[in-house]
Amino acid sequence: MQNKKIVIANWKMNPLTGKDAEKLWSGVAKNLPTLKKSEVVICPPFLYLEKLKSASRRTRKILLGAQNAFMGDTGAFTGEVSGAMLYNFGARYVILGHSERRAQGETNADVNQKIKSVLAAGLYPILCVGESVRDAEHGYFNLVKDQLSECLHGLTKNWLRKLIIAYEPVWAISSTPGRRDATAEDSYEMAIFIRRVLADKWGRDAAQTRIIYGGSASDRDAEEFLSRGGVDGLLVGRASLSPEKFVKIVAICEALKS
């Protein structure tokens, strides 16, 4: 487990205009505490990356990320954006395999190709894994194991320090009908399991990979997940659209005892 925590904002398809994106970014940047124990990444929609690239250089507190990437570099792929393009636009992280994209048909094999492509482009992949339901027979462990095995197929231990695994239980996401809150115990259980799966594949080198929690993480439960959830950070969705809430999450991260 790495020493520094990481807090990642996923703005999803928000906000509506570039002006609002700059305002949201500024609201976070102006109020962030001094970062000693954590890293902060914001992943806006593609079309705001260029606008926010200069803002990122000015603040130097916030790193830029993207919400998806294509599995190739260039070519006749209408509507796609490659990892190399993202890197040139200032992004250094990219979310891959998010449940909302999997719901549109993205497969583990697709995610595997994307991970390899963005690593080659110099980006840090944030791989999302997680179950839709928690069945009484604990079959969700096998589902997450399959996601990890298939999405990370062919990767060597040389890439482990750049890889981030985001545990994102679909049943806890705000957009899921009938959602319910996940607990730190849920996170801890899965974080331990994920570490075991990675260790079985790569041995002690797997400790280089950070595991974070997603799934409607907020300022209300951030301390619980960070202190008792067995994770190295948070992937924040809806709460990241409020500068006040997002900054509070980062402040909680900074206040944690080492």
Image: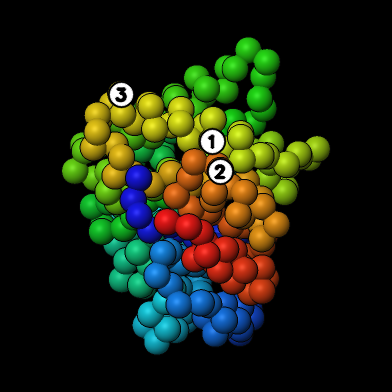
Query: How crowded is the residue under tag 1: few (<14 C-alpha within 10 Å), some, or many (20+)?
Result: some
Task: Please report whichever mark, 2 or 1, sits nearer to the chain's N-terminal start.
Answer: 1
Q: Amino acid at mark 2?
A: Arg
Count all numbered tags in the image, as a single digit.
3
Helix or strand or loop: what does disc 3 sit on? helix
User: Residue at left 76%, top 40%?
Assistant: 179
Please tell me whether residue 49 is drawn above or below residue 221 in the rendered image: below
Which mark is nearer the camera, 3 or 2?
A: 2
Query: How crowded is the residue under tag 2: few (<14 C-alpha within 10 Å), some, or many (20+)?
Result: some
Task: Please report whichever mark, 3 or 2, sits nearer to the chain's N-terminal start.
Answer: 3
Say the numbered circle drawn on residue 188: 1
Quarter holding residue 87: bottom left
Residue 72 image position (x, y, % from top left): 31, 50
Q: Which residue is mark 3?
A: 200
For residue 157, side relative to residue 229 (left or right): left
Please tell me whether residue 144 is drawn above or below residue 156 in the rendered image: above
Please tell me whether residue 192 is drawn above or below residue 46 in the rendered image: above
Circles 2 and 1 in contact, beta carbons < 8 Å:
yes
Helix or strand or loop: what does disc 1 sit on? helix
From mark 1 to mark 3, how far is it between C-alphas?
A: 18 Å
For residue 115, side relative to residue 232 (left or right): left
Q: Amino acid at mark 3?
A: Asp
Q: Is residue 98 visible?
A: no
Q: Which residue is mark 2?
A: 228
Residue 175 image position (x, y, % from top left): 72, 48
Q: Amino acid at mark 1?
A: Tyr
